[in-house]
Amino acid sequence: MFNPSLETINTNLENSYASFLDEKSETVEELNPYISELRTVSSDITRIIPLDEFRKFLNERSEGTFDKTIYKLILKQLGGEYLPATSVLQFSHAYQAVEERLASRADYLRDVLQDHRSNLERLRENLLSQRSKEKKNLYGIMEGSELKLTILDMKCSA
């Protein structure tokens, strides 16, 4: 019984993908812009490379500021934190998917923030409108308001 290794299956899949792309007018880089950047890790986009090489590349590219959370999301997209290696092609697809998901989330949060700002402005306008309707007397107390005081007179006997 033939039981191919994961690397063999991976290579066959990527070769099929590369053949598919050869038949199309788009290049791999046109479909995924991250591939051209990641070619500095390996010019052969189907070669299996340790994930640590990708992490080093991303960290160097961002001058040490690459977000570890994003890297963990990429690993999760690839199938887990314990994956030892992958190809430039697979990593670029995972990277692109994570970036698209983060961009979508950022757009959503911008919309939510804009809604909150609009609500805040509306509430501010309502408050100013209410203040302008209030008339205050000489002592700064709103006209028509009532002040009630209860005076308690308590004496202590010793």
Image (tube, helix red, strand yellow):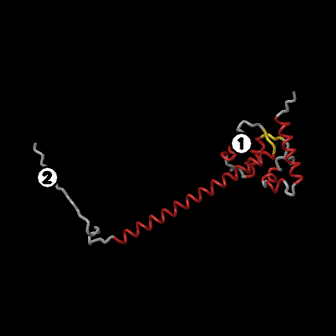
Residue occupying image coordinates x 87% and y 48%: 18
Considering every residue shown, the one lying at the far left of the view is 157
81 sits to left or right of 31: left
> Tag 1: Cα neighbours inside 10 Å, few (<14), some, or many (≥20)?
some
Query: Which residue has dot 1 on it?
Result: 75
Q: Position of residue 71 (x, y in %)?
A: 70, 45
Q: Position of residue 90 (x, y in %)?
A: 79, 45
SS label for mark 1: helix
Query: Which residue has dot 2 on it?
Result: 153
The mark nearer the N terminus, 1 or 2, is: 1
37 sits to left or right of 67: right
Q: Determine whether label 1 and label 2 are within 8 Å by CB.
A: no
Image quadrant assignment for residue 157: top left
Q: Nearer the viewer, residue 2 or 59?
A: 2
- The amino acid sitting under disc 2 is Asp
Q: Nearer the viewer, residue 27 or 59?
A: 27
- The amino acid sitting under disc 1 is Leu
SS label for mark 2: loop
148 sits to left or right of 105: left
Report, in whole angstroms, how far the alpha carbon at label 1 lies from the one at label 2: 75 Å
Q: Quadrant of the N terminus?
A: top right
Q: Quadrant of the C terminus?
A: top left
Q: Against 6, is 141 above or below?
A: below
